[in-house]
Image (spheres, helix red, strand yellow):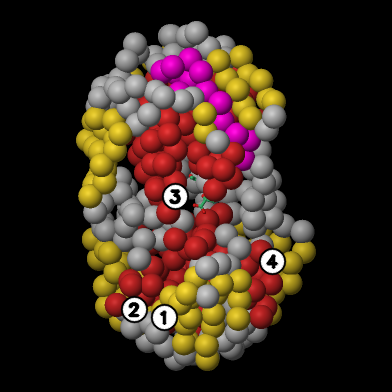
């Protein structure tokens, strides 16, 4: 196992430029979408993170061929060898369920393990299953697997009971090859969903209402190949914005889409963080000594993203006053709090709220990562905690951050990875 060691300083000064990688949560559905065609799909700005290699392992098991060089990926699915996404892979990455829709649409069959729960909460799939049944698929849940079959999906109206990113993406992909028109209502509007629609349209899909609550898809007999540039990772961008707000002496963040982070930037500016939009693709952020406490409530896009909740909580430990952090998306996304308490934070969890009292001086300690974004929050806290912080289970970080330590070292952080 590996752990991360950070020698933090309360007066740490990070300086320089960091280039944001492609979005993990955009590239995963894009790779799944390559199941919808027998032609090549070329993706650029692909982040070399663990989840990408996990889904590529799954795609290979299904019969895909792929070639990845640096941040360029070419995937082609000429034939299918298997229809099954095993429990081992789904357990490792819940987003494996995104192969269900494309497999069902193109091959009429799919068998995907139920994901079970994870560190951030129960991860049900009822909204996905309900949608596929509405499209005419027969679904059996047996032995921990979703078994789906359909001779030809039939377009229809589907309204999601609640906004679901993966559910919207899965049904979008399935509807592209269904017979007739599908109308999806109450769709997720995350930039990653929009990026998937952009790719699908390049592949020949007929989609109206991209980025809106109601998306109309006119099914076609087949889709073709395409070439697509994955959008920048807005959560990595937000993570570096917080790093800059905690310890930055004018950090420049490049290859970012500020319009994808509007709510986060707005909340940080209300706290007093000086953030300047240099252009449509770069930001400058600096430390602010007198941060003001801010309440946040996570909600579907364009609201405050749940994937930034843990990182923003760290910033609020350095703000004067009390901040109330309300998590409405996942039922157990406060596992980072106990670790932050070990570093000296003053936070109390009550139901779906974490009440943060600042400003507290953090001191280095041994901590344990539990999930991707919780581990990012521990890195952020470790940067400004005086003394040494270690973070075990560091593999969680690698799921969604490309070269995080390297990028932080280039800004002046004292951080290294060691084998346990
Ligand atoms: C996506 O997960 C992201 N993952 C998550 O990012 C992100 O936190 C989440 O969307 C919310 O923005 C990827 O895109 C790969 P949901 P997803 O379906 O699709 C409930 C990260 O750190 N729900 O929008 O799984 C669900 O339990 C990860 O990068 C049902 O009830 O999220 C949750 O409470 C973590 N039934 C809520 O909806 C369903 O069938 C939102 O889930 C599906 C979901």
Mark 3 to mark 2 CA distance (whole Å)? 23 Å
4 vs 1, front mark: 1
Above or below 280: residue 175? above
Looking at the rendering, which quadrant does residue 38 occupy?
top left
Mark 3 to mark 4 CA distance (whole Å)? 29 Å
Mark 4 to mark 1 CA distance (whole Å)? 28 Å
Say which residue appears at 54% left-offset and 80% top-offset.
390
Say which residue appears at 42% left-offset and 54% top-offset.
50
- Which mark identifies residue 354? 4
Front residue of 297/15: it is 15
Do the residues bearing badges 1 and 2 touch, measured as CB atoms within 8 Å? yes
Residue 315 image point, x, y percent = 53, 74
Say which residue appears at 39% left-offset and 48% top-offset.
53
- Tell me where the magenta segment starts and ends, as one range: 103-115
Q: Earlier in the sequence, mark 3 or mark 2?
A: 3
Q: Quadrant of ligand 1?
A: top right
Residue 393 image point, x, y percent = 56, 67
Above or below 405: residue 398? above
Q: Earlier in the sequence, mark 4 or mark 1?
A: 4
Do the residues bearing badges 3 and 2 touch, measured as CB atoms within 8 Å? no
Res. 298 visible in picture? yes
Q: Secondary structure at mark 4?
A: strand
For label 1, the crowd category at 10 Å Cα-Cα, with few meaning under 14, some 14 to 19 and many 20 or more, is many
Q: Which residue is mark 3?
A: 51
Q: Which residue is mark 2?
A: 409
Q: Which residue is mark 1?
A: 415
Q: Is 111 a magenta residue?
A: yes
Q: Is 288 a magenta residue?
A: no
Q: Is mark 3 within 8 Å of ligand 1?
A: yes
């Amino acid at each position: 196992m590996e752990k991360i060691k950070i020698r933090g300083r309360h007066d740490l000064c990070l300086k320089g430029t960091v280039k944001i990688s492609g979005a993990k949560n955009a590239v995963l559905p894009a790779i799944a979408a390559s199941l919808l065609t027998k032609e090549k799909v070329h993706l650029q700005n692909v982040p070399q993170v663990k989840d990408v290699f996990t889904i590529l392992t799954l795609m290979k098991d299904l019969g895909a061929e792929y070639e990845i060089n640096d941040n360029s990926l070419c995937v082609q699915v000429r034939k299918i060898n298997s229809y099954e996404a095993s429990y081992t892979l789904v357990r490792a990455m819940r987003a494996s369920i995104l192969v269900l829709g494309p497999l069902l649409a193109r091959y009429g069959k799919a068998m995907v393990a139920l994901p079970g729960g994870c560190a951030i909460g129960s991860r049900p799939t009822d909204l996905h299953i309900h949608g596929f049944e509405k499209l005419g698929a027969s679904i059996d849940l047996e032995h921990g697997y979703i078994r789906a079959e359909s001779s030809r999906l039939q377009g229809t109206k589907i309204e999601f009971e609640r906004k679901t990113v993966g559910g919207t993406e899965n049904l979008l992909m399935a509807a592209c090859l269904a017979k007739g028109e599908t109308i999806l209502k109450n769709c997720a509007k995350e930039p990653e969903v929009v990026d998937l629609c952009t790719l699908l349209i390049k592949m020949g899909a007929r989609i109206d209402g991209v980025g809106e609550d109601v998306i109309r898809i006119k099914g076609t007999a087949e889709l073709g190949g395409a070439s697509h540039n994955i959008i920048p990772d807005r959560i990595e961008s937000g993570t570096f914005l917080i790093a800059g707000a905690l310890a930055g002496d004018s950090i420049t963040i490049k290859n970012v889409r500020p319009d994808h982070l509007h709510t986060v930037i707005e909340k940080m500016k209300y706290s007093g963080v000086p953030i300047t939009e240099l252009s449509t693709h770069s930001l400058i952020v600096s430390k602010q000594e007198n941060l003001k406490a801010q309440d946040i409530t996570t909600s579907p896009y364009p609201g405050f993203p749940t994937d930034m909740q843990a990182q923003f909580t760290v910033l609020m430990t350095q703000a004067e006053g009390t901040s109330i952090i309300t998590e409405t998306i996942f039922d157990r996304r406060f596992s980072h709090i106990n670790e932050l308490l070990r570093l000296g934070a003053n936070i109390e969890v009550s139901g779906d709220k974490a009440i943060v009292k600042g400003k507290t001086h953090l001191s280095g300690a041994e901590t344990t990562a539990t999930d991707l974004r919780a581990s990012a929050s521990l890195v952020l806290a470790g940067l400004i905690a005086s003394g040494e912080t270690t973070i075990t289970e560091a593999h969680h970080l690698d799921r969604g951050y490309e070269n995080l330590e390297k990028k932080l070292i280039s800004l002046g952080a004292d951080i290294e990875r060691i084998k346990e």
